[in-house]
Image (spheres, rainbow, N blue to C red):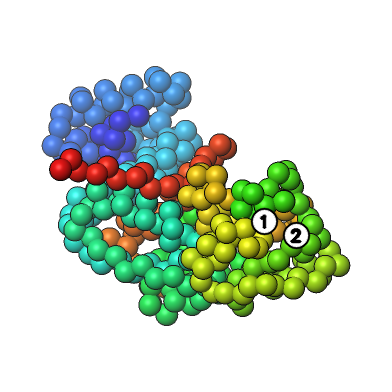
Amino acid sequence: MHAHVLRYLEEVVRRGSIRKAAEALNVASSAVNRQILKLEASLGAPLFERRTGGVRLTPAGEILARHARETLYGFARARASIDDLKGLKTGHVKIVALDSLMVDFLPAALEEFHRLYPGVSFSVMASGPSDVGEEVLSGEADIGLSFALGDMEHLKVIARIPTAMHAIVASGHPLARRRVVRLTDCVQYPLALVHDTLPLTPLLEGEFVRAGAEPAALLRSNSMEFLRQAVKSGMCVAFFTRLGFAHEIEKKEVVAIPLAETRLSGIPLAVIVPVRRRLSVAATAVADHLGRRLQLLAKPGAAPLVRAPRRRRAS
């Protein structure tokens, strides 16, 4: 159904007369009447009762008029958003995210956005899961990427996907050939744990307790890069989602083994923005872009978004 036909219908409803609607639209009355008759023929139901001096909606007409209003309103909003994007020349967007998303996902997603809107700049900071939401609420960041656990009041989720913690080991580690492991299997080897990261550390440690295992960590650190190198060396077993090791998994330097403990699967990873603070056009566009890219990761068979290697220029 074309927008101009809906406009004709809406104007007739508003004016209560085909003649008055035609005058307001600056078209011939016959053109408006012809479109209304076509609509009635295609729907197999009269939309108006023709009366002396005007028209009145039938029950079928009420339904279609409501649809017309909603459609035209939605079209106007979409057009306004597109006009905003056309004017998106510059802007600065502040993003706070989990350290694990700094390696492949965010660089690739922002590189893609930059190709579309090169005038937009970014501040990108790493933070723990419990701090991401606080920084978005306080205005320190426009957009957050974190696990959507705990209190999400005053935060809006743009996109959310389920993720699962895995046991991450070097490709030569004794556990590397296992298709699934339990935490009790992992405690037989040196462990690396993230230092006091809420709410994931208590969640993981709670699962160790339920399994009757006592995790004696060889390493505790808040540095993702340090833990990545420790795992690659074969020094320890660490517990992360696949996103933090996407590049190493692709190169077969490490293996991500699913955990048998179901509470460590289905952990929601989300793009979040404030509810009570209006974002700039640039920040809104970036949040939507990150949300779409995040949702791509949840599609069956999808691989984590990894940057393609840059080609060297010929000398």
Which image quarter: residue 45? Answer: top left
Vertical relation: 15 (above or below) 281: above
Q: Nearer the viewer, residue 77 or 89?
A: 89
Question: Residue at label 1?
Answer: 167
| Residue pictured at 76% horizontal, 70% vertical | 215
Q: Position of residue 199 (x, y in %)?
A: 63, 72
Q: Position of residue 126 (x, y in %)?
A: 44, 70
Vertical relation: 302 (above or below) 28: below
Q: Quadrant of the N terminus?
A: top left
* Residue 209: image tag: none
Question: Residue at label 2?
Answer: 186
Residue contact between numbered discs 2 and 1, judged by CB atoms under 8 Å: yes
At label 2, which amino acid type do we have? Cys
Bin the neighbour count of mark 2 within 10 Å (Cα to Cα): few under 14, some 14-19, many 20 and up: many
| Residue pictured at 42% horizontal, 43% vertical | 66
Question: Which residue lies most toward the right here?
Answer: 212
Q: Nearer the viewer, residue 181 or 154?
A: 181
CA distance separating discs 2 and 1: 8 Å
Q: Quadrant of the C terminus?
A: top left
Q: Secondary structure at mark 1?
A: strand
Residue 304 visible in the displayed image: yes
Q: Position of residue 139 (x, y in %)?
A: 38, 77
| Residue pictured at 79% horizontal, 57% vertical | 185
Query: In the rendered view, does 171 fall on the left or right side of 134?
Result: right
Q: Nearer the viewer, residue 70 or 212?
A: 212
Q: Position of residue 117 (x, y in %)?
A: 22, 52
Q: Earlier in the sequence, mark 2 or mark 1?
A: 1
| Residue pictured at 61% horizontal, 53% vertical | 170
At label 1, which amino acid type do we have? Ala
